[in-house]
Amino acid sequence: MQDNTQSSSYQQLEQKSKYTNMFLRWFLYFVLILFASYFIFPLYVMVVTSLKTMEEIRQGTLLSWPSGLNFESWAVAWGGRGYGAGDTFLRPYFWNSIKMVVPAVFFSTFIGAMTGYVLTKWRFKGDSWVFLFLLFGCFIPFQAILLPMARTLGVLGISNSIVGLVLVHTVYGIPFTTLFFRNYYVSVPTELVKAARIDGAGFFKIFFKILLPISAPIIVVTVIWQFTQIWNDFLFGSTFSFGEAAPIQVALNNMVLSSTSVKEYNVDMASAIIAGVPTLIVYVLAGKYFIRGLTSGAVKG
Amino acid sequence: MFKWLEKNLPKIVMAPAVGLIGWFVYGFVLWTLYISFTNSKILPKYELWGFGQYEKLWASRKWLISVDNLLVFTALFLIFCIVIGIILAIFLDQKIRAEGVLRTIYLYPMALSFIVTGTAWKWILNPTLGIQKMFIDWGFENFTFDWLVNREMAIYTIVIAGVWQSAGFVMALFLAGLRSVEDEIVKAAKIDGAGLFTVYWRILLPMMRPVFFTSFVILVHISIKSYDLIVALTQGGPGISTTMPALFMTQTAFHKSQVGLSAASAMMMFMAVAAVIIPYLYSELRRENAR
């Protein structure tokens, strides 16, 4: 009885507000699309600018459509103009970044998986303190380690080298990868591991036979997170490398800043897109995993 | 021997991670702390010098400007990111068509580096060929938009680009928060006659307190470490009008070769982050333990 009156009054309410509702929905879509255009605007401007000639850029506006698909500035950004000194282009730095990212992502993910495994499945006295000890590394502002790091790389003889950057990114990735794997393995039932131990399986066998096969989602999250962080890094790249060993973000920044004669905005935009495209592709293809990593590891030092 | 190895294998596997973090995080921070108490110039010196560097730091006009900029930037960055993030999250939560596409658009800047973002915005905001020219060509002949080269206003261009990059992330956090609320609560409130506005303002948003807290911590953290965006957009200029602590630190260390002073500025940043992070970690751990 009571239920009945309630639901009918609810229906009445719905009817009365039908028109206000329609207005509200239009308003809703209007605001959402307005913000969408704010977010898409820079990307649009980057793409159309990169396809224009400098003449078109001077004559048109930011939004004006390019006269044709002119990929020349892309070619210049990627491979240069072909004259010797002072001709900077992104190709070698793009490969530098790849050579830096692949090993750094691999090592930091592997170490994170191992520590996450021990911290959840081979618990020992004081292990939660060890976790806290590692976790704190996620939060330090990197300025507090730049000076000693620069000296250490010098002493080891790997300053201004890809190897040095791999070391730096591996080390400062460990807190994040550990956090990811630890939080994932915590939800895997420990009984599985206990049963396997009774059956005589050892430390590594349990990891490779039981945990690794179910780790695909967290490996994807971790690899995407590490890839994005390391690819996009500028602080370490610009502090610990220069010249030929620089990763792509540093090269992009140098290119944009050190234009000698006329500013070529079309080449600048093409370069920016080239530097941003790898992470953008990852985001579009694996957005779900990207966001999951973002929400669990976003407090980055 | 073999028995011992087998028994301690987990700890041995842990050792590299613990060793690396112990050395490269804790050891290095302590080293920086020590150096901040010495009178180091180009090369580190190890005789203690007391609080001299900190006195020098807080007497430096450039440092005071960077702290001032950081406060202005953080305040605006927080407000805009959170307000835009909440509006987008609430609006997207209304069973919107093409929600997936919109969400992707709002969040894609997070995938780009601050250098890419800065390069793009620098071009858009440049007074000769950018937004200003666009409006003039559209017939607004007296339109001026020269914030990028204006001492007073340049800091706000960093806010514009920063908000563009991070607002979508706050949206994602709040959307996840709103989606985790039970439908029943909203239904019950509606039956009691509450309008949509009241439902959000009085019921749902107050339930989002942890999300507010998380967003706050993450955004403050991003803003304290702001470095790349400033380098790409303004290089701290015009003049030193957009310097921030992170930029101050690297410039003092690597261009001015004042290692002691830059160590002191790094420690100030470290303490600022710690002041935000330690309460956050504490409350997170307490929540986890309570579960």
Image (cartoon, coloured by chain):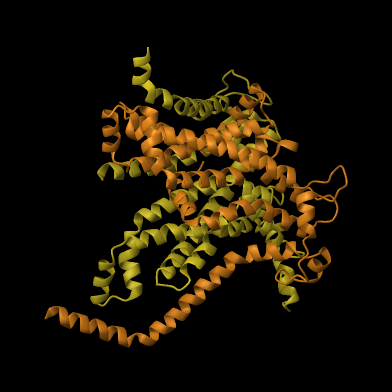
Chain colours: A orange, B yellow
> In the rendered image, which quarter contains the N terminus of chain A?
bottom left
Left or right, A18 with respect to B114, comes to: left
Position above or below: A49 against B249 = below
- Would residue B64 be visible to someone looking at this image? no
Residue B14 in percent (x, y) is at 42, 27
Q: Residue furthest front?
A: A199
Position above or below: A278 against B54 = below
The part of the image, by quadrant, that contains residue B95 is bottom left
Residue B48 in percent (x, y) is at 56, 20
- Would residue B14 be visible to someone looking at this image? yes
Q: Residue furthest right?
A: A83
Position above or below: A158 against B276 = above
The part of the image, by quadrant, that contains residue A230 is top right
Between B232 and A184, the residue placed more toward the observer is A184
Residue A119 in percent (x, y) is at 36, 33
Left or right, A282 with respect to B256, comes to: left
Left or right, B253 with respect to A207, comes to: right
Left or right, B55 with respect to B11, comes to: right
Name the residue rendered at 71%, 52% in the picture: B238
Name the residue rendered at 25%, 44% in the picture: B290
Position above or below: A116 against B89 = above
Between B197 and A128, the residue placed more toward the observer is A128
The part of the image, by quadrant, that contains residue B281 is top left
Residue B240 in percent (x, y) is at 68, 47
The count of marks equals: 0
